[in-house]
Image (cartoon, rainbow, N blue to C red):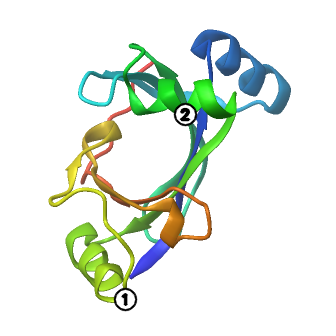
Amino acid sequence: MLTRIDHIGIACHDLDKTVEFYTSTYGFEVFHTEVNQEQGVREAMLKINETSDGGASYLQLLEPTREDSTVAKWLAKNGEGVHHIAFGTADVDADAAAVKDKGVRVLYDEPRTGSMGSRITFLHPKDCHGVLTELVTSAAEPSQDH
């Protein structure tokens, strides 16, 4: 089942400015950056700590790259701030099926590719007390770049 908080996703208008805030204010370091064309975002993963299951916990900063992306629409409605919480799991397929069996809507029929080569799916916020929830199985070797 779920093993850790994998990351907290934070939507922002200016990725560089937001990264500067978190690095200069809290001393976090950028572990990985990428552009996810499918989701229409440019992102930075700031590593917070290692975890006992071999994974890590991150802040994921998300800037939309196009106006029709989910994050752009969310920003237009809500402004900058916490967008979602992601829980780590060894088996995103099994855990998504388990929560679906409990009546929680899973937003993707099949997990998709997420940050750093992970496999992800999302749970509907209306079924999770207003919180967009992501399930993440990390790639065997998360790539660090910056």
Instruction: Indicate the secondary structure of the residue bearing disc 1.
Output: loop
Amino acid bearing label 1:
Lys
Residue 97 is left or right of residue 6, and the answer is: left
Q: Relative to residue 117, is residue 23 depicted above or below?
A: above
Amino acid bearing label 2:
Trp
* Mark closest to the chain's N terminus, 1 or 2: 2
Residue 109 is left or right of residue 100, and the answer is: left
Q: Which residue occupies the extreme right position in the image?
A: 25
The image shows a total of numbered marks equal to 2
**Residue receiving disc 2:** 74
**Residue receiving disc 1:** 102
- Quarter of the picture containing the C terminus is top left
Q: Is there a contact, CB below 8 Å, between mark 1 and mark 2?
A: no
Q: Relative to residue 5, is residue 101 depicted above or below?
A: below
Residue shown at the point (30%, 42%) measured from the top left: 114
The image shows residue 59 at horizontal and vertical percentages of 60, 41
Residue shown at the point (48%, 30%) measured from the top left: 71
The image shows residue 119 at horizontal and vertical percentages of 25, 53
Residue 28 is left or right of residue 130, and the answer is: right
Foreground pick, 64 / 28:
64
